[in-house]
């Protein structure tokens, strides 16, 4: 067996070394190299950004739902971005849409989700004392922090933040004369994103290295929890695709500041013809979506990994089709790199390319479908406990189905002609990627909060949070399908200029109300989160009766995670409700030799091998 | 002052909630240790999940059926019929999958809610099932792909030769249209020749440019293939004509095209929709700045004969702007005079 070689791997940090060193406040909470602290830093920063990004969406939803409302009360915050009539400035509307997208995709769902849970769970679930490089890990957070500060700062400059859409297509983003947000705001956006990419790469290299090299004895790849598999593949996607965005950003910086023409050609703007010749705006789109599409999976895969773990634990059933789950994630990973141009069917790119990318895009639906069926089968004949994390996971699967199926419309180039850049797309990606990933994040927080802070979150507040969010999100995004089928274009400040888009004012108002309710439900979570951190009920070591290694640590693991030796792994992480077993779960560190009553025939044969390994 | 009062009020209310919450948790701790699954609310949650499924589905069907005409735009082009058919076939397939999987998700959650007396089924894998639900979606998707490819290739095929050519140019923040005039050829252009009057940057060393004309609205003939030559002057724009099911980006430096056959005149659409003010419109669907939401171009579809008549009435741009004669090379001046005046002569 290949894993026997890996089994010999021994952790390098000895136990006495790992803890009991005096740390100052700064090294413990600020410039910490402990993966758990870094994870919490990512989480709190992510929550901060989520509030800002969410609030922005409310402001522009007000404009869309109630275009006649006075927003004068926002004047202290928005200043000159309100017109004299107390309405939102159309250019600032675009800035809000742009920053909402950037913040939610990168700062919340990439850093907040991957950053938090990859950092927190990788060492704990594979049985390592910390990340391969604690220092790089710390750098990763502080690059992200610097990037955040710059992005935050750009919100307040006089010309406004970047406002050409989160995809920052040139020439709009390259020419300050095209819109004011393309001035300093765009420069700061590019600098901030460059730092963000550095942060992602430092983190990603660390995750991959840690998973490959630092698994505890017995933790072969075939025994890894699906969370780890998802973080592993996510890190690989990020490592391969983020540099391309960096390249695109650099070329854009050249075009903006040094007079090159990578993306610019034949432009007459603000009364003058620019000297640029020969560039192609389409080239930028290719480079952008080469990251932009895999980014969807960078956001989604960790959420799916977390869901797999939570659903299995709370159904008290092994995840159905463990290998199929891994294979489908690998499939998604590979395919995610060859579907990017489905964002560009009507960009003017050669229609033949459109055919190729449509074919590849629809193929990616197969592994996604397999995952859904496997989740459903895991629930089937389970013994389901509805913890808040479990509800959020079920919600995720529901969003994943709803948003995934509409992918078959927009992934089909012939249908996409009509639906491209309409509200149908907005509905599609907010469900499948935005809301699903957000629910994954929430499931993760509710599930691992006890391990993060040693206390329980209040379940009933969790249920309230879940139900308002779940119903609210559907009420926000489901109606957008109808608005999109009717052809309403996205990123429109107002629809009154067109006869064709003059209807649906009532539905738009409804969506806005639902969005407000959903946003305010998040304060229930915030209260629960911070209150429970200090005053919550003390958590038992293994509150969900789960199998993975993190629950074998003390209530609040110190730096080094396990006070004694790192546990050895003997079985896969999903031995729930095994026939013959006394309890309905058998943790990964319980040897097969101790559970003769529940061993399957194949496992019984392995008991002897286990003994030999022990002796070594 | 009022602000302060409201602030204090909100603060007090929040404080009261906090106190109540604390009291509630302390009482709960005193009462009993929480041993039951799902904080004692497992049944409630299972029930709400089922309720959500039923009411959600009811709402979905009610709205989709009642408001069908509101979100379903009438189709006014030949290819629109085929792309819409593909849309509704996909809707039927995905709708079916949607309903079945959502029902299973919520029903399983309800049915298999925790019960102390029961043990979950240890069912880690079944290759047969996995193969079935890998192959089934694969077959369905193959069908959709093949159908999609056929439609896409037909829509994107080169325009027929007899197609009416119209140029649409986007700029911040409007559209301009240009017709080739009598010679049927669009004159060449150069972005360096653009000025306030010569918005298209017409190049007057090209003979074909002399009879080009630029009306305010876009006029199209019913039943004839029309090819849009699309370009942008400053940033990306996108031509979107919702009733024609047509969309194509306008890219500076890279002209694009889209051809189609309009099937209903504006008059016919007014009758069909029962809206006597109905007009076809073109909108911009690629964010292009401040006025992105206001790039409206009025489109009028005529019967073919009416269209020819309208075309014959149009004056070449050069005849309206004789000062640009100076840009015409000397050896072509006479030709330019004739071509640009030609229309006037025929009308008079």
Image (cartoon, rainbow, N blue to C red):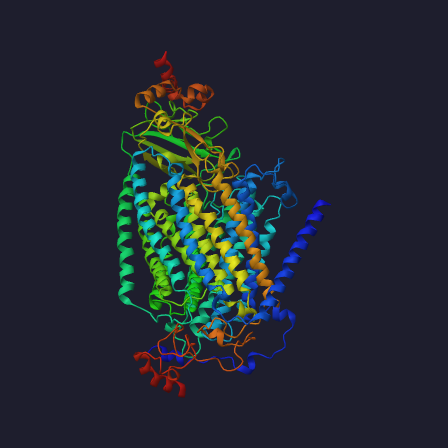
Question: Picture coordinates of residue A104 (x, y %)?
Answer: 51, 53
Seen from the viewer's position, the closer of residues B100 and B231 is B100
| Image quarter of the C terminus of chain A | bottom left
Q: Residue furthest right?
A: B1
Q: Look at the picture and state if A378 lies above or below A490.
A: below
Q: Position of residue A336 (x, y in %)?
A: 38, 57
- From the viewer's side, name the closer residue of B309 and A179: B309
Name the residue at 40% across, 21% down. B316
* Residue A526 locus on image (x, y percent): 58, 59
Residue A257 vertical placement versus A332 (above, below): above
Q: For the view shown, which residue lies furthest in the top direction?
A: B348
Of residues B323 and A522, the one drawn nearer to the viewer in this rendering: A522
Q: Is residue B239 above or below residue B206?
A: below
Which quarter of the rendering shows the N terminus of chain A?
A: bottom left
Residue B167 is left or right of residue A78, and the answer is left
What residue sits 48% from the left and 32% below the top?
A497
Q: Residue A529 is drawn in which quadrant? A: bottom right
Figure quadrant of residue A51: bottom right
Q: Left or right: A473 with respect to A603?
A: right
């Amino acid at each position: 067996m290949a894993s026997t070689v890996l089994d010999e791997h021994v952790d390098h940090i000895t136990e006495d070394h790992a803890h009991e060193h005096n740390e100052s406040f700064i090294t413990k909470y600020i410039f910490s190299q402990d993966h758990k602290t870094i994870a919490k830093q990512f989480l709190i920063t992510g929550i901060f950004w989520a509030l800002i990004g969410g609030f922005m969406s409310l402001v522009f939803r007000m404009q869309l739902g109630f275009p006649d409302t006075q927003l004068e009360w926002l004047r202290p915050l928005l200043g000159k971005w309100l017109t004299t009539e107390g309405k939102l400035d159309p250019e600032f509307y675009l800035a809000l849409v742009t920053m909402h997208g950037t913040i939610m995709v990168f700062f919340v769902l990439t850093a907040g989700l991957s950053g938090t849970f990859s950092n927190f769970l990788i060492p704990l679930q594979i049985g390592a004392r910390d990340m391969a490089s604690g220092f790089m890990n710390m750098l990763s957070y502080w690059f992200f922090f610097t990037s955040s500060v710059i992005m935050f700062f750009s919100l307040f400059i006089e010309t406004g933040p970047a406002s050409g859409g989160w995809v920052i297509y040139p020439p709009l983003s390259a020419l300050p004369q095209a819109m004011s947000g393309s001035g300093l705001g765009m420069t700061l956006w590019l600098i901030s994103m460059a730092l963000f990419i550095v942060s992602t790469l430092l983190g990603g290299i660390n995750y991959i290295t840690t998973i490959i090299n630092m698994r505890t004895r017995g933790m072969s790849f075939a025994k890894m929890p699906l969370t780890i598999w998802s973080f592993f593949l996510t890190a690989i996607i990020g490592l391969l695709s983020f540099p391309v965005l960096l390249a695109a950003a650099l070329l854009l910086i050249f075009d903006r500041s040094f007079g090159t023409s990578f993306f610019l050609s034949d432009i007459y703007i603000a009364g003058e013809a620019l000297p640029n010749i020969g560039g192609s705006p389409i080239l930028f789109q290719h480079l952008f979506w080469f990251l932009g599409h895999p980014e969807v999976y960078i956001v989604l895969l960790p959420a799916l990994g977390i869901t797999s773990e939570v659903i299995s634990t709370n159904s008290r059933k092994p995840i159905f089709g463990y290998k199929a789950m891994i294979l489908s994630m690998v499939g998604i990973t590979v395919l995610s790199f060859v579907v990017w141009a489905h964002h560009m069917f009507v960009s003017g790119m050669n229609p033949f390319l459109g055919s190729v990318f449509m074919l590849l895009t629809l193929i990616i639906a197969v592994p996604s479908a397999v995952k859904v069926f496997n989740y459903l089968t895991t629930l089937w004949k389970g013994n389901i406990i509805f913890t808040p994390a479990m509800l959020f996971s079920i919600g995720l699967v529901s969003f994943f189905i709803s948003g995934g199926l509409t992918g078959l419309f927009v992934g089909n180039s012939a249908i996409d002609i009509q639906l491209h850049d309409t509200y149908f797309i907005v509905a599609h990606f907010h469900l499948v990627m935005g809301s699903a990933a957000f629910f994954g994040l929430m499931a993760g927080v509710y599930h691992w909060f006890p391990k993060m802070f040693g206390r329980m979150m209040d379940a009933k507040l969790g249920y309230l949070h879940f139900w308002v969010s779940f119903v609210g999100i559907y009420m926000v995004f489901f109606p957008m399908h109808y608005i999109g089928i009717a052809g309403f274009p996205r990123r429109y400040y107002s629809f009154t200029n067109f006869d064709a888009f003059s209807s649906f004012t009532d539905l738009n108002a409804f969506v806005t109300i639902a969005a407000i309710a959903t946003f305010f439900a998040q304060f229930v979570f915030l209260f629960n989160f911070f209150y429970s951190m200090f005053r919550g009920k003390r958590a038992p070591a293994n509150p969900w009766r789960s199998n993975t290694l993190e629950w074998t640590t003390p209530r609040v693991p110190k730096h080094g995670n396990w006070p004694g030796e790192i546990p050895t792994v003997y079985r896969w992480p999903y031995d729930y409700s095994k026939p013959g077993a006394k309890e309905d779960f058998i943790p990964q560190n319980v040897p097969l030799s101790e559970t003769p009553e529940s061993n399957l025939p194949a496992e019984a044969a392995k008991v002897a091998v286990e003994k030999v390994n022990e002796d070594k | 002052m009022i602000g302060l009062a409201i602030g204090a009020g909100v603060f007090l209310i929040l404080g009261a909630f906090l106190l109540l919450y604390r009291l509630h948790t302390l009482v709960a701790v005193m009462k009993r240790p929480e041993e039951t699954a799902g904080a004692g609310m497992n049944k409630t949650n299972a029930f709400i999940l089922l309720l959500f499924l039923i009411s959600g589905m009811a709402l979905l069907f009610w709205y989709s059926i009642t408001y069908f005409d509101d979100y379903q735009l009438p189709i006014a082009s030949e290819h629109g019929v085929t792309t819409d058919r593909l849309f509704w076939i996909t809707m039927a397939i995905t709708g079916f999958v949607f309903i079945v999987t959502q029902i299973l998700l919520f029903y399983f959650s309800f049915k298999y809610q925790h019960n102390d007396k029961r043990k979950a089924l240890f069912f880690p894998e079944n290759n047969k099932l996995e193969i079935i639900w890998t192959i089934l979606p694969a077959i369905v998707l193959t069908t959709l792909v093949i159908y999609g490819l056929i439609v896409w290739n037909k829509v994107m095929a080169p325009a027929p030769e007899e197609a009416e050519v119209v140029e649409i140019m986007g700029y911040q923040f409007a559209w301009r249209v240009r017709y080739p005039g009598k010679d049927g050829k669009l004159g060449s252009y150069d972005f360096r020749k653009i000025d306030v009057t010569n918005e298209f940057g017409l190049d007057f060393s090209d003979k074909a440019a002399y009879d080009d004309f630029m009306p305010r609205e876009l006029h199209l003939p019913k039943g004839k293939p029309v090819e849009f030559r699309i370009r942008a002057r400053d940033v990306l724009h996108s031509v979107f004509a919702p009733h024609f099911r047509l969309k194509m980006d306008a890219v500076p430096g890279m002209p694009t095209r889209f051809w189609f056959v309009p099937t209903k005149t504006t008059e016919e659409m007014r009758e069909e929709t029962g809206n006597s003010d109905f007009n076809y419109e073109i909108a911009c669907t690629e964010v292009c700045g401040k006025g992105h939401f206001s790039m409206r171009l009025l489109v009028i579809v005529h019967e073919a004969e009416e269209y020819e008549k309208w075309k014959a009435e149009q004056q070449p741009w050069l005849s309206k702007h004789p000062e640009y004669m100076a840009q015409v090379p000397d050896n072509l001046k006479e030709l330019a005079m004739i071509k640009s005046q030609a229309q006037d002569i025929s009308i008079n």
